[in-house]
Image: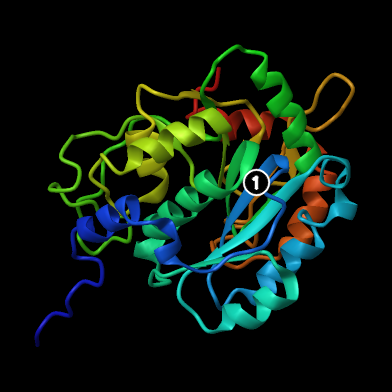
Amino acid sequence: EEEEECVYATAANQTLHRMINTMPIDKFVLKAPTFDRHTNYRMVFIVISAPFEKYERDEIRRTWANEKSSITRKVIDSLVIFLMGRSSIAWVEAADHNDILQVDVDDVYRSMVYKVECAFRWVRENLKSEFVVKVDSDTVIHVDRLNEHLKRLDQRGSDRWMTCYRWLPAMPIRDSCHRWFVAEEDFGLEYFPEYCNGPGYVMKRSAFDTIVDRMGSVKVFEVEDAFFTGVVARNLVDLYCVDGMVSPLFTEYSSCDEDASPTLSVLTTHFQFGEEKSKKNLTAAYERLKRPLCDTTVTRWLYQTAQCK
């Protein structure tokens, strides 16, 4: 019996990568939100979404993206944009909410890097902001806590920095049946540089602009977080990892300051319900993020491999 061909056994699409970075970006934008071009937003959140995730988008709109849930969202201008690929579903929803950026890219997992490239270029050319935040649709944010972390990190004096849960140098996956397969022709080194864990990372605007301006000159591969925050950002952007700010797994615990204020600001729902990695309840996760249990033992275990400084 003939073996079934691997779904992911292809190298990256260097032609599409080159087109996204050289053609006018409007050629790739099918639908974009309207906004005030004169506003310098504190944070622009790019939420990676799929057409079928309407329920998740509505949960995000009701929870962490809702202006009523955050002093920062209410008082300081920030923008939440849902990024989608090709789909007829987006048109009706975009008219109702004015928060969808739809790009002319297949909406499949291996095309995420191209979707994000389109979004990054569009933000670079159309929006002013102090920070750009990339967020997965299975992740919740405590915007006020995150804003306080960013204020402190900005005092370190770096011109270009980003912050996240950091992966130390790891080997690319060469198994062509794996969803994170990287062909040697796309990235030939034995190790990635250190990079940000994908569910959520924050870039100071100068760092974001540097990444966008450089990404077209680097061969693309289809592992989004390692590409943008590792290979493209290498030697150009400082990577800050703050203990307890971002959790790479769902947890009910947070490290807390001396006054018992939690530090956890970005929480993924991975393994929220035990061994089922993808099963999630964003509303419940956000309620837990608002009031996590203080326990440094758990957060120390989560961060022992990241070696934050």
Q: Is residue 117 above or below residue 188?
A: below
Image point (13%, 80%), residue name = 3
* Image spot of residue 259 (x, y percent): 90, 22
Instruction: Find residue 155 and report its image quarter.
Output: top right
Image point (73%, 23%), residue name = 151
Residue farthest along the top direction in this orientation: 157
Judged from the image, the secondary structure of the residue bearing numbered disc 1 is strand
Provide the residue designation for mark 1: 44
* Image spot of residue 186 (x, y percent): 18, 48
Disc 1: CA contacts within 10 A as few (<14), some (14-19) or many (>=20): many
Q: Is residue 270 above or below residue 299?
A: below
Q: Is residue 276 visible?
A: no
Image point (18%, 58%), residue name = 11
Q: In the visual, does 22 lie left or right of 27? A: left
Q: Is residue 80 above or below residue 233?
A: below
> The N terminus is located in which quarter?
bottom left
* Image spot of residue 71 (x, y percent): 88, 42
Q: In the image shown, does 77 or 273 lie closer to the viewer? A: 77
Q: Is residue 29 visible?
A: yes
Q: Amino acid at mark 1?
A: Val
Q: In the visual, does 165 lie left or right of 97? A: left
* Image spot of residue 100 (x, y percent): 62, 66
Instruction: Find residue 54 and report its image quarter.
Output: bottom right
Q: In the image shown, does 78 or 188 lie closer to the viewer? A: 78
Residue farthest along the left direction in this orientation: 1
Which coloring applies here? rainbow
Q: In the image shown, does 172 or 47 lie closer to the viewer? A: 47
Residue farthest along the bottom direction in this orientation: 1
